[in-house]
Amino acid sequence: MSSVFKDALGGTFEQLPAGLQMLHTVNARQVWRGTARVQRGRNLIAKAVATLFRFPPAGDTLPVQVLQLPTASGERWIRTFGTHRFVSNLSRLPNAPAGEINEQFGLFRFKVGLHWDGTHLHYPVTGGQIFGIPIPHFVLPISDTRESETTNGSTRFDVSIALPLIGLLVRYQGNLQRMED
Protein backbone atom coordinates (compact mmCIF):
# COMPACT_ATOMS: atom_id res chain seq x y z
CA MET A 1 0.00 0.00 0.00
CA SER A 2 1.31 3.45 -0.89
CA SER A 3 0.68 6.65 1.03
CA VAL A 4 -1.37 9.64 -0.14
CA PHE A 5 1.58 12.01 0.29
CA LYS A 6 4.11 9.72 -1.39
CA ASP A 7 1.80 9.28 -4.37
CA ALA A 8 1.22 13.03 -4.61
CA LEU A 9 4.83 14.13 -4.20
CA GLY A 10 6.40 11.40 -6.31
CA GLY A 11 10.21 11.64 -6.32
CA THR A 12 10.09 14.77 -4.16
CA PHE A 13 8.89 12.60 -1.25
CA GLU A 14 12.41 11.14 -0.96
CA GLN A 15 13.77 14.67 -0.38
CA LEU A 16 11.71 15.09 2.81
CA PRO A 17 13.51 14.55 6.13
CA ALA A 18 13.03 11.08 7.63
CA GLY A 19 10.56 12.33 10.26
CA LEU A 20 8.27 13.91 7.67
CA GLN A 21 8.47 10.79 5.52
CA MET A 22 7.41 8.73 8.54
CA LEU A 23 4.54 11.13 9.37
CA HIS A 24 3.28 10.88 5.80
CA THR A 25 3.59 7.12 5.27
CA VAL A 26 0.33 5.83 6.71
CA ASN A 27 0.33 2.12 5.84
CA ALA A 28 -0.83 1.11 9.32
CA ARG A 29 -2.21 2.79 12.43
CA GLN A 30 0.17 5.48 13.72
CA VAL A 31 -0.01 7.67 16.82
CA TRP A 32 1.85 10.95 17.23
CA ARG A 33 1.89 13.05 20.41
CA GLY A 34 3.18 16.45 21.41
CA THR A 35 2.06 19.88 22.47
CA ALA A 36 0.49 22.79 20.63
CA ARG A 37 -0.56 26.37 20.97
CA VAL A 38 -3.93 27.20 19.41
CA GLN A 39 -5.19 30.66 18.43
CA ARG A 40 -8.72 31.31 17.15
CA GLY A 41 -10.20 34.15 15.14
CA ARG A 42 -12.07 36.68 17.27
CA ASN A 43 -14.96 37.86 15.11
CA LEU A 44 -18.34 36.09 15.17
CA ILE A 45 -18.14 34.76 11.60
CA ALA A 46 -14.64 33.34 12.16
CA LYS A 47 -15.81 31.70 15.40
CA ALA A 48 -18.87 30.19 13.67
CA VAL A 49 -16.86 28.79 10.73
CA ALA A 50 -14.14 27.40 13.03
CA THR A 51 -16.86 25.70 15.08
CA LEU A 52 -18.46 24.27 11.92
CA PHE A 53 -15.14 22.62 11.00
CA ARG A 54 -14.64 21.51 14.63
CA PHE A 55 -11.29 23.28 14.87
CA PRO A 56 -9.83 23.24 18.40
CA PRO A 57 -10.46 26.05 20.90
CA ALA A 58 -7.67 28.45 21.85
CA GLY A 59 -5.09 27.35 24.41
CA ASP A 60 -1.41 27.33 25.28
CA THR A 61 0.70 24.19 25.69
CA LEU A 62 -2.18 21.84 24.93
CA PRO A 63 -1.46 18.12 24.69
CA VAL A 64 -2.03 17.03 21.11
CA GLN A 65 -2.43 13.58 19.59
CA VAL A 66 -2.70 12.69 15.93
CA LEU A 67 -4.07 9.24 15.18
CA GLN A 68 -3.58 8.22 11.54
CA LEU A 69 -5.47 5.32 10.01
CA PRO A 70 -5.25 3.93 6.49
CA THR A 71 -8.63 3.71 4.74
CA ALA A 72 -9.82 2.19 1.47
CA SER A 73 -9.59 5.61 -0.21
CA GLY A 74 -6.58 7.10 1.62
CA GLU A 75 -6.03 8.15 5.23
CA ARG A 76 -8.08 9.33 8.21
CA TRP A 77 -6.41 11.82 10.56
CA ILE A 78 -7.99 12.18 13.99
CA ARG A 79 -6.49 15.17 15.78
CA THR A 80 -7.10 15.68 19.51
CA PHE A 81 -6.12 18.94 21.21
CA GLY A 82 -6.68 18.56 24.96
CA THR A 83 -10.14 16.95 24.96
CA HIS A 84 -11.26 18.44 21.62
CA ARG A 85 -11.19 16.19 18.56
CA PHE A 86 -11.56 16.90 14.85
CA VAL A 87 -11.24 14.56 11.90
CA SER A 88 -10.36 14.83 8.24
CA ASN A 89 -9.92 12.30 5.46
CA LEU A 90 -7.06 12.61 3.00
CA SER A 91 -7.07 11.06 -0.45
CA ARG A 92 -5.61 11.36 -3.89
CA LEU A 93 -7.97 11.34 -6.85
CA PRO A 94 -7.06 9.38 -9.98
CA ASN A 95 -5.30 11.60 -12.53
CA ALA A 96 -4.79 14.40 -9.99
CA PRO A 97 -1.92 16.75 -10.84
CA ALA A 98 1.44 16.16 -9.17
CA GLY A 99 1.45 17.45 -5.61
CA GLU A 100 -2.32 17.52 -5.23
CA ILE A 101 -4.24 15.78 -2.46
CA ASN A 102 -7.80 16.15 -1.20
CA GLU A 103 -8.75 16.82 2.40
CA GLN A 104 -12.35 16.32 3.40
CA PHE A 105 -14.07 17.77 6.47
CA GLY A 106 -17.64 16.48 6.46
CA LEU A 107 -19.39 17.85 3.37
CA PHE A 108 -16.44 20.06 2.40
CA ARG A 109 -13.63 18.77 0.20
CA PHE A 110 -10.53 20.85 -0.47
CA LYS A 111 -7.75 20.44 -3.01
CA VAL A 112 -4.35 20.98 -1.42
CA GLY A 113 -1.26 21.60 -3.56
CA LEU A 114 1.69 20.22 -1.59
CA HIS A 115 5.03 21.92 -2.11
CA TRP A 116 8.46 21.08 -0.62
CA ASP A 117 10.85 24.06 -0.54
CA GLY A 118 13.86 22.17 0.84
CA THR A 119 13.04 23.06 4.46
CA HIS A 120 9.25 23.08 4.82
CA LEU A 121 6.36 21.12 3.36
CA HIS A 122 3.64 23.66 2.45
CA TYR A 123 -0.11 23.00 2.13
CA PRO A 124 -1.87 25.75 0.15
CA VAL A 125 -5.59 25.28 -0.59
CA THR A 126 -6.06 25.40 -4.37
CA GLY A 127 -9.73 24.49 -4.74
CA GLY A 128 -12.78 23.26 -2.92
CA GLN A 129 -16.28 21.82 -3.13
CA ILE A 130 -19.39 21.48 -0.99
CA PHE A 131 -22.00 18.91 -2.04
CA GLY A 132 -19.84 18.43 -5.16
CA ILE A 133 -20.35 22.09 -6.15
CA PRO A 134 -17.13 24.07 -6.66
CA ILE A 135 -16.42 26.82 -4.13
CA PRO A 136 -15.48 30.10 -5.87
CA HIS A 137 -11.79 30.93 -5.44
CA PHE A 138 -12.51 34.32 -3.88
CA VAL A 139 -14.07 32.61 -0.83
CA LEU A 140 -11.66 29.65 -0.52
CA PRO A 141 -9.79 29.29 2.76
CA ILE A 142 -6.25 30.63 2.76
CA SER A 143 -3.93 28.03 4.22
CA ASP A 144 -0.50 29.12 5.40
CA THR A 145 0.46 25.67 6.61
CA ARG A 146 3.91 24.15 6.84
CA GLU A 147 5.75 21.28 8.44
CA SER A 148 9.42 20.75 9.10
CA GLU A 149 11.73 18.55 11.12
CA THR A 150 13.44 19.92 14.23
CA THR A 151 17.07 19.26 15.19
CA ASN A 152 15.92 16.61 17.71
CA GLY A 153 13.96 14.74 15.01
CA SER A 154 10.45 15.77 16.03
CA THR A 155 7.99 17.14 13.51
CA ARG A 156 7.15 20.85 13.78
CA PHE A 157 3.80 22.01 12.42
CA ASP A 158 2.38 25.48 11.89
CA VAL A 159 -1.18 25.48 10.54
CA SER A 160 -2.90 28.80 9.86
CA ILE A 161 -6.28 28.93 8.15
CA ALA A 162 -8.06 32.18 7.28
CA LEU A 163 -10.94 33.33 5.09
CA PRO A 164 -10.85 36.30 2.73
CA LEU A 165 -12.45 39.38 4.35
CA ILE A 166 -13.06 37.40 7.57
CA GLY A 167 -9.51 36.78 8.73
CA LEU A 168 -8.04 34.11 10.94
CA LEU A 169 -10.17 31.02 11.70
CA VAL A 170 -7.54 29.00 13.54
CA ARG A 171 -3.79 28.72 13.93
CA TYR A 172 -2.15 25.81 15.70
CA GLN A 173 1.59 25.37 16.15
CA GLY A 174 3.55 22.68 17.90
CA ASN A 175 5.67 19.56 17.78
CA LEU A 176 4.89 15.88 17.37
CA GLN A 177 6.82 12.66 18.12
CA ARG A 178 5.78 9.24 16.91
CA MET A 179 4.65 6.88 19.68
CA GLU A 180 5.04 3.14 19.62
CA ASP A 181 1.78 1.22 20.09
Image (cartoon, grey):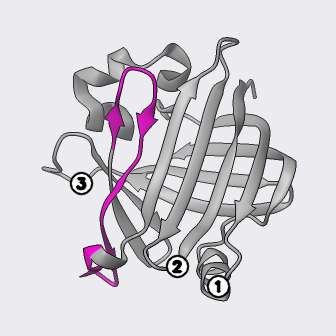
Mark before the other along the chain sequence, 1 or 2: 1
Amino acid type indicated by mark 2: Ile
Q: Circle 3 sits on which residue?
A: 93
Highlighted magenta segment, given as a residue range: 114-137
**Which is nearer the N-term, disc 1 or disc 3?**
1
Residue at horizontal 38 percent and vertical 69 percent from the top: 109
Tell me how far mark 1 sits from mark 2, CA to CA. Answer: 11 Å
Mark 1: few/some/many CA within 10 Å (<14, 14-19, 20+)? few
Query: Element type at marker 3?
Result: loop
In the picture, the quarter occupied by the N terminus is top left
Between marks 1 and 3 in the image, the one whose residue lies nearer the viewer: 1
Q: 22 or 127, which is in the foreground?
A: 127
Q: Position of residue 167 (x, y in %)?
A: 54, 72
* Residue 48: mark in rendering: 1
**Residue bearing mark 2:** 166
| Residue 38 found in image quarter | bottom right
Q: Residues within 10 Å of mark 2 (few under 14, many from 20)?
A: some
Pinpoint residue 27: horizontal percent, then vertical percent: 48, 32
Tell me the amino acid under the disc marked 1: Ala
Q: Nearer the viewer, residue 166 or 152?
A: 166
Distance from the alpha carbon under mark 3 to that under mark 2: 30 Å
